[in-house]
Image (cartoon, rainbow, N blue to C red):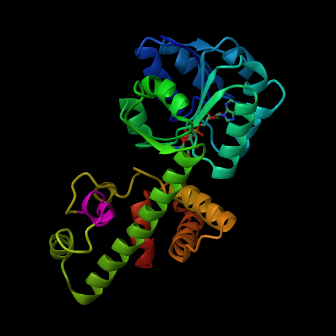
Amino acid sequence: MAKIGFIGLGNMGGPMAANLVKAGHDVIGTDLSADAVAQLVEAGGTAGPSIAEAVNGAEVVITMLPAGSHVRSVYLAEGGVVTTVAAGTLLIDCSTIDVQTSRAVAGAAADAGMDMIDAPVSGGVAGAAGGTLTFMVGGEDGAFARAEPILAAMGKNIVHAGGAGNGQAAKICNNMILGVSMIGVCEAFVLAEKLGLDHQKLFDISSTASGQCWSLTSYCPVPGPVETAPSNRDYQPGFSAAMMLKDLRLAQEAAQNTGASTPMGAQAQALYSLFDAAGHANTDFSGIIRFLRGKA
Ligand code: NAD
């Protein structure tokens, strides 16, 4: 079992760290929130009063932070992870951040003799609590092999997507598909309503025809056809519109940096930005159907 320093014990990191404790690891956690640290202690972990104290002597460091700026500073600032841990330490960043920052931090870690992977997740808070997350991993083969058994205590699908930053690339490409396809499915239901076509009929036809996709068949944005979908619980998330907007912004930033043409991704970002600004940041992202009806 490993000695693990865990930084960022929020909605996702808290339950992930608790699952590492449950699997028998020695977890020392730190967070800006004293409450978050207290919850880890309650779960059987140890409080690290600072980043340096949490990671000093650790064999593995895991971070689960809000955005790229936090990741850059936690790893690279004076007294941060890279200046504190020993060469050979395995670093795992599970945050969802921009590809450029992810690659820059991994490069600095490699220069200091550390193995680093980016391992953003899907599965949300329920997946973090249940230990059923999917990890999309970028990094060298050797680092991936070292990380796999640690990640297995927190998730059930662990996919190696290539070199440094490719986990982040996979996550934003997937979520750009999801944002675009959800809006497409919502628009089809809104048009069907105007044409007098029943929701269930459209679902039955399209779910076995060429319009079939996950946004329709697993997460249907109208109540009825898919019992587990947030549309049946007044669009309580699920996956919030704010989270979707964050990932669409990261996708657009990456598209601009690389010169990729992603006009549908840009439209999806613009629509989720309006939805968010209209006060729906904490609505499930499938709730954008109400906005498209003009009744949000
Ligand atoms: P969160 O805001 O609940 O948790 C982030 C934690 O990081 C907070 O507790 C904060 O205090 C801590 N933190 C920030 N800066 C710090 C620092 N310098 N030192 C120590 N702690 C610091 O966010 P979350 O929902 O847990 O999400 C974390 C990451 O996971 C994000 O990148 C998010 O995009 C990604 N993600 C979230 C979900 C979800 O459903 N919540 C799903 C998939 C991916």
Residue drawn at (25%, 68%) of the image: 212
Residue at image coords 39%, 63%:
286
Q: Quadrant of residue 295?
A: bottom left
**Ligand 1: image quarter:** top right
- Is 182 within the magenta? no
- Image point 43% across, 42% down: which residue? 124
145 or 287, which lies in front? 145
- Whether residue 242 sits left or right of residue 213 in the image: it is right
Position above or below: 258 against 165: below
- Left of 63 or right of it: where is 53? right
Query: Quick check: 262 above or below 28?
Result: below
Residue 281 vertical placement versus 45 (above, below): below
Q: Can you give x and y, in whole percent of width and height, for residue 94 in the image?
A: 55, 37
Q: Is residue 62 left or right of residue 174?
A: right
Where residue 159 sits: x, y (%)? 42, 41
Query: From which residue to which does the magenta span run?
Result: 213-223
Horizontal and vertical percent position of residue 77: 81, 32
